[in-house]
């Protein structure tokens, strides 16, 4: 049983054109609690025809929405933001139940998610154009920024609210309408957000949420539609590549926030306690299921043993359990497949010579719980540092020089986030410049916020979310040349 104060936030229908609707063929799929396998609710399992309906609703709502002054759109977004914060406890509980993260982390995500709505409510009012000095006396050259039109968002399960608001808030602020397809594991958070948007007065059709357990059907309709002018996707690199290729057929704009393989470098002059604190926050948050979480630790050989010892001590304090239990820091992994992947990566590394300093096995709680783990003597050939682990596992490798650390750090097709710890200012600048990553944390393990650009390079994606750059993703640049003046 879900005990929400505001029971209307638990939705069992999708949201299209301002109405709560079932799938046309009546199909539904169950949403389960990853901590105990229990069914929380069933939601519509929609297909391409349902998606077409949502696209049509977004298209119908577009002219009136884009015609409204940015200030009015801003006021509605601001009201949505306020309602999200009023409902923060219920939203956090719903998220913990369907996603698994601790209640404290879920509450943090609700507030983080809300911060994007607030930021873009303001930023939408500043979609400035330019007046360009003309090369001839009789002309006036103007550049105006206009919303791209109908947009689509496809989001993952690891941040069920923030990954939606980071896309929808700039879209709506820019005068675009949106069709959202949340991950099949976490549609309830998305539907609760839609309920609050409706209560805030955001007009019918401006935001639509299509739930499904058959993402390829919905994704196929969104990418094939010439009406949809932009797709913003957050998820794995293989699915991102597939969607980019599909978007090519209608030359859609795309933003891709894909997988990462973040290095966490500890230099020999690092403040080791600060580094351990950053490592815990970066690695073990959300049970390690974060695109920007440290995936491999590169530790200078002079401080390797000292860092490893302190990290193990901190990791052994982490409390594992269902996210709703007080004091829990590490919840379950999202499903059995994720658990099997983490187990495989650790077992393989161990068979290839890695030493287990902590954990290294499934948790005694059973189910989808894995022990917070630290591995030493890991080498760069092991899959545990080449693939995205997406679990509470810290593989430690040694290095001897700055050049070697940077070379190891850049030796991956990914380029999302990187972290390093040093007290040397010169090294801080030089290493930050040489790391081939979209985001770099220097002496800091938590770097995401609404005011800074979030995104990756190489196979970690294209485009940026949050910040003033996040609004640009939803704006076209139109040049107007006025002659005969
Ligand atoms: P995923 O790629 O399996 O799924 C992401 C979304 O894509 C889900 O909504 C899913 O239903 C949908 N999807 C899957 N196949 C599809 C298809 N054929 N057509 C259309 N949609 C399809 O990823 P996931 O397991 O949900 O999320 C974890 C991944 O997301 C990790 O790789 C992680 O690094 C990445 N991620 C990246 C960021 C970022 O900002 N760069 C943020 C969070 C997560």
Image: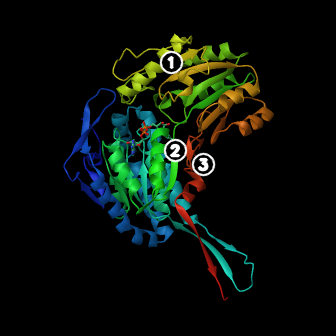
For disc 2, the neighbor class at 10 Å (few under 14, some 14 to 19, many from 20) is many
Q: CA distance from mark 3 to mark 2?
A: 12 Å
Residue matched to label 3: 453
Name the spot of residue 400 as percent of width and height, x first: 74, 19
Q: Nearer the viewer, residue 4 or 341?
A: 341
Q: Upstream in the sequence, badge 2 or badge 1?
A: 2
The answer to whether 476 is drawn above or below residue 442 in the figure is below
Q: Secondary structure at mark 2?
A: strand
Check the image and name the residue furthest to the bottom.
Answer: 484
The answer to whether 320 is drawn above or below residue 205 in the figure is above
Toward which corner of the image does residue 368 lie, by quadrant?
A: top left
Looking at the image, residue 278 sits to the left or right of residue 301; the answer is left
Queried on whether the Cβ of the residue with tag 2 lies below 8 angstroms from ligand 1, the answer reads yes
Q: How many marks?
A: 3
Name the spot of residue 166 as percent of width and height, x first: 49, 50
Q: Secondary structure at mark 1?
A: strand
Name the spot of residue 485 as percent of width and height, x first: 67, 88
Q: Upstream in the sequence, badge 3 or badge 1?
A: 1
Tag nearer the camera, 2 or 1: 2
Toward which corner of the image does residue 92 lie, by quadrant?
A: top left
Residue matched to label 1: 373
For disc 3, the neighbor class at 10 Å (few under 14, some 14 to 19, many from 20) is some
Looking at the image, residue 362 sits to the left or right of residue 313; the answer is left
């Amino acid at each position: 049983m879900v005990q929400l104060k505001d029971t209307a936030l638990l939705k069992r229908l999708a949201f299209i054109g301002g109405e709560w609707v079932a799938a046309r063929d009546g199909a539904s799929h169950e949403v389960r609690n990853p901590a105990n396998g229990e069914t929380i609710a069933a939601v519509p399992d929609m297909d391409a025809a349902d998606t077409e309906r949502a696209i049509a609703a977004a298209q119908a709502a577009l002219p009136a929405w884009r015609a409204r002054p940015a200030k009015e759109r801003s006021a509605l977004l601001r009201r949505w933001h306020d309602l999200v914060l009023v409902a923060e406890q219920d939203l956090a509980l719903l998220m913990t139940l369907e996603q698994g993260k601790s209640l404290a982390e879920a509450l943090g995500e609700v507030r983080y998610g809300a911060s994007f709505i607030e930021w873009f409510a303001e930023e939408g009012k500043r979609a400035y154009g330019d007046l360009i000095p003309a090369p001839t006396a009789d002309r006036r050259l103007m550049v105006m920024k206009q919303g791209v039109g109908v947009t689509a968002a496809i989001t993952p399960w690891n941040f069920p609210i923030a990954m939606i608001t980071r896309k929808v808030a700039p879209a709506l602020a820019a005068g675009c309408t949106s069709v959202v397809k949340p991950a099949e594991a976490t549609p309830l958070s998305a539907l609760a957000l839609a309920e609050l948007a409706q209560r805030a007065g955001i007009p019918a059709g401006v935001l639509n949420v299509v739930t499904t357990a058959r993402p390829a059907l919905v994704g196929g309709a969104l990418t094939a539609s010439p009406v949809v002018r932009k797709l913003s996707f957050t998820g794995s690199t293989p699915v991102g590549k597939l969607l980019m290729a599909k978007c090519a057929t209608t030359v859609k704009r795309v933003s891709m926030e894909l997988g990462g393989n973040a290095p966490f470098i500890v230099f020999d002059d690092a403040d080791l306690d600060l580094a351990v604190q950053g490592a815990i926050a970066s690695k073990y948050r959300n049970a390690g299921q974060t695109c920007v979480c440290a995936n491999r630790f590169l530790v200078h050989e002079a401080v390797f043993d000292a860092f490893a010892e302190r990290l193990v001590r901190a990791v052994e304090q982490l409390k594992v359990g269902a996210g709703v239990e007080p004091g829990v820091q590490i919840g379950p992994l999202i499903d059995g497949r994720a658990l099997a992947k983490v187990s495989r990566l650790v077992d393989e590394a161990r068979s290839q010579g890695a030493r287990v300093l902590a954990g290294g096995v499934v948790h005694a709680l059973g189910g989808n719980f894995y022990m917070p783990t630290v591995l030493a003597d890991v080498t760069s050939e092991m899959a545990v540092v080449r693939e995205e682990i997406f679990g509470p596992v810290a593989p430690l490798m040694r290095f001897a020089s700055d050049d070697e650390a940077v070379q190891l750090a850049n030796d991956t097709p990914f380029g999302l986030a990187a972290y390093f710890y040093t007290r040397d200012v010169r090294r801080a600048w030089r290493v930050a410049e040489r790391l081939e990553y979209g985001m770099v944390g220097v002496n800091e393990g938590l770097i995401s916020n609404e005011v800074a650009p979030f995104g990756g390079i190489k196979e970690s994606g294209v485009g940026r979310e949050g910040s003033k750059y996040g609004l640009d993703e939803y704006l076209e640049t139109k040049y107007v040349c006025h002659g005969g003046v």
